[in-house]
Amino acid sequence: MSARAALSRGVTAQRLRKNCTFYVNELSHPTCGVHKPVILLLPWLGSRPQAVDKYCEIYFRSGFDVLVVESEVKEFLWPRLAFDHGKRLLELLESERFISRPLLVHAFSIGGFTFSQLLIHMSENTNEYEALTRRIKGQVYDSLVAGSEERMSVGLGKVLFPHLENLVKRASLLYFAVFKRQTVDYFNYSINVFYNTPVTAPALFFSCDNDPLSDPQTVEKVIEYWQKRGMSVTAQKWEDSTHAGHLKRHPQQYLNTLQMFLQSLHIAPLKAKM
């Protein structure tokens, strides 16, 4: 059952703003009320609704509400836009609709970069966002964009424009070189904030060795750094898989790992097996 099909079976969709849709799961236990956890779902660039629906459905079956916030390629190419987007998203998460709700973050690919923009605001204004930081009870990163600008340029071509891969790579590298201060330097700052994130909730990483956009060694460094900080980190890595497509390639492993992680958080009873 897709998210759209779920709308007729107890899930209603509310378009809150551009690229931001809130799915309210009215089938979940009525006693949860305003304290029911919300999944902040941050999809990958170019994601199709049918693909995102599959992840929404996982959480619908488990009784969660889902807030889907999409990213745009212009926010990646001009990070200041992502920074402003992050501020608006923080304002939404602190609005009356969400202020009492525990949060789980599930970020795919560039969605991790989008979430890092929230972390920048949170780390630079710790007192203002202290309550919000505590409300984040878990974080899932699937195919986290990580590595050099050359790797990102190659990945952009493979993922978004496979027929123009080499052209996109050359154009992207030139662009990053010309606008180094506004792009590469900002990416490095975002990475540093991500390493030293104010959110210390348990984390789960899904990754693979052959991801064109995600350097497995960089992901390992993040995991090791967080573990040294005392954070609880779980990792599921495959030798061969697809960027932001692990659920399709390895469905049972993916679902089992995710379910065990959610159960370990003890924030809400799971309504059904995934």
Image (cartoon, helix red, strand yellow):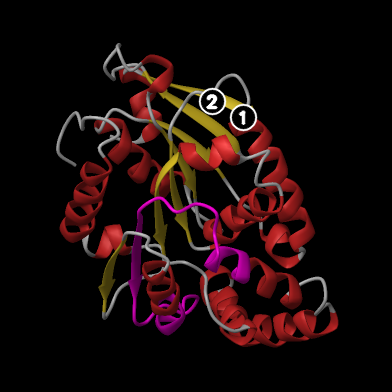
The reply to whether residue 18 is visible in this rendering is no
32 horizontally vs 46: left or right: left
Rendered-image quadrant of the N terminus: top left
Q: Residues within 10 Å of mark 2 (few under 14, many from 20)?
A: some
Q: Which mark is residue 98?
A: 2
Q: Residues within 10 Å of mark 1 (few under 14, many from 20)?
A: some
219 horizontally vs 173: left or right: left
Q: x, y percentage for residue 51?
A: 40, 49
Q: Nearer the viewer, residue 47 or 103?
A: 103
Identified at 42% across, 66% down, the residue is 229
Q: x, y percentage for residue 124?
A: 71, 53
Mark 1–mark 2 Cα distance, whole angstroms, equals 6 Å
**Magenta includes 199?**
yes
User: SS at mark 2?
Assistant: loop
User: The magenta stretch spans which residues?
Assistant: 191-219
**What residue would you read off at disc 1?**
94
User: SS at mark 1?
Assistant: loop
**Magenta includes 255?**
no
120 horizontally vs 212: left or right: right
Q: Nearer the viewer, residue 269 or 180?
A: 269
